[in-house]
Amino acid sequence: MASKHLSAPIGPKEIIISSRNFKRFLSPTVDGEVKGCGLRAPMKAKYDLREELGLGEFDLPLIPESEWEDRLALQIKDKAQLSDIRNSGKFGGQIPATDQGGQPYCWAHSSTSAILMVRALNNQPYIELSAYAVACIIKNYRSSGGWSEESLKFIAERGIPDAAHWPIQSKQKSNDNPETWANAKRYRFSGEWMSLSSQLMKKQLVTCLLSNIPVCTDLNWWSHAICTIDLVSLSPFRTRILNSWGNGWSQEGTGILEGSKAIPDDALAPRVATGAG
């Protein structure tokens, strides 16, 4: 059996956020720009939206805790984690981290990152997708927070355009045109999403990560939504996130969450993901 102290490689610049230091990273400045968060407590509206979206309950068989160590060891040995897939998902190079700039649009970027990872898993070519298109239309161009279900519902219905049709970080209303939304339909995610249970959050999160399923993760302590991509270690419990603050944050856009800071308050995951060949 693998050692509980087994850990996936951590980059030399990769930030580790724990209960001891998390306040230092709540709103950092990257390359002179203050980055936004934007997760908003949804209350009842969230559950109405969840019903509209048709989110199902988590229905994957849970991976037994007795198998976690060995499965993690195998992922690491085979270089088969989602971060490994990200590193070759752009025509053999790295898929860039999305960048929300100073806008409170993390909730649109978390789902966009997850869709980019699912495309890479399914051996689909990398396309730069515009989370701002989703956020601007939903919020009528206001700088307003939200939560992941909002963006997922929109993308399921209307799709998400590429950067050639809606430039990254653009809030120009002229981007909203028929050609843009015809393009967006090409990248509409047609799969089903499932909601992780608060009672089984850690077990379901680990099951997803050991199954190469990205998780849209909402964190109340950070007021931030991100995409969780790897299980890093079990003791201490650490996960790797793909943030939406650009490649200049931490280690090319990824960071490590430790202990309670790694456990989502709410999380969504695609029901089916196919591993890259």
Image (cartoon, rainbow, N blue to C red):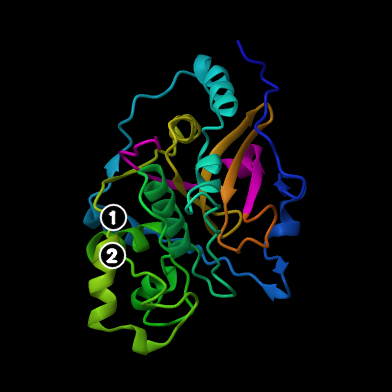
| Furthest residue toward top | 1
Q: Is residue 258 left or right of residue 69?
A: right
Q: Is residue 275 left or right of residue 253?
A: left
Spatial separation of the CA atoms under disc 1 and disc 2: 7 Å
Query: The residue tagged with tag 2: helix, strand or loop?
Result: loop
* Residue ID at (43%, 61%): 147
Which amino acid does the dot numbered 2 rest on? Answer: Gly
* Residue ID at (45%, 83%): 171
Q: What is the magenta range? A: 254-277
The spot of residue 254 in percent (x, y) is 62, 51
Sooner in the amino-acid sequence: mark 1 or mark 2: 2
What residue is disc 1 on?
A: 189
The image shows residue 252, relative to residue 183, as above or below, that is above
In reply to whether residue 118 is colored magenta, the answer given is: no
The spot of residue 156 in percent (x, y) is 26, 59
Q: Quadrant of the C terminus?
A: top left
Q: Is residue 12 left or right of residue 33?
A: right
Query: The residue tagged with tag 1: helix, strand or loop?
Result: loop
Q: Quadrant of residue 2?
A: top right
* Residue ID at (37%, 45%): 123
The image shows residue 218, relative to residue 161, as above or below, that is above
- Residue 240: numbered disc: none
Q: Residues within 10 Å of mark 1 (few under 14, many from 20)?
A: many
Q: Quadrant of the N terminus?
A: top right
Q: Residues within 10 Å of mark 2 (few under 14, many from 20)?
A: many
**Who is closer to the viewer here, 32 or 128?**
128
- Residue 159: numbered disc: 2
Which amino acid does the dot numbered 1 rest on? Answer: Phe
| Furthest residue toward front | 92
In reply to whether residue 268 is colored magenta, the answer given is: yes
Q: Is residue 154 left or right of residue 238?
A: left
| Residues tagged 1 and 2 counted as in contact (Cβ below 8 A) | yes
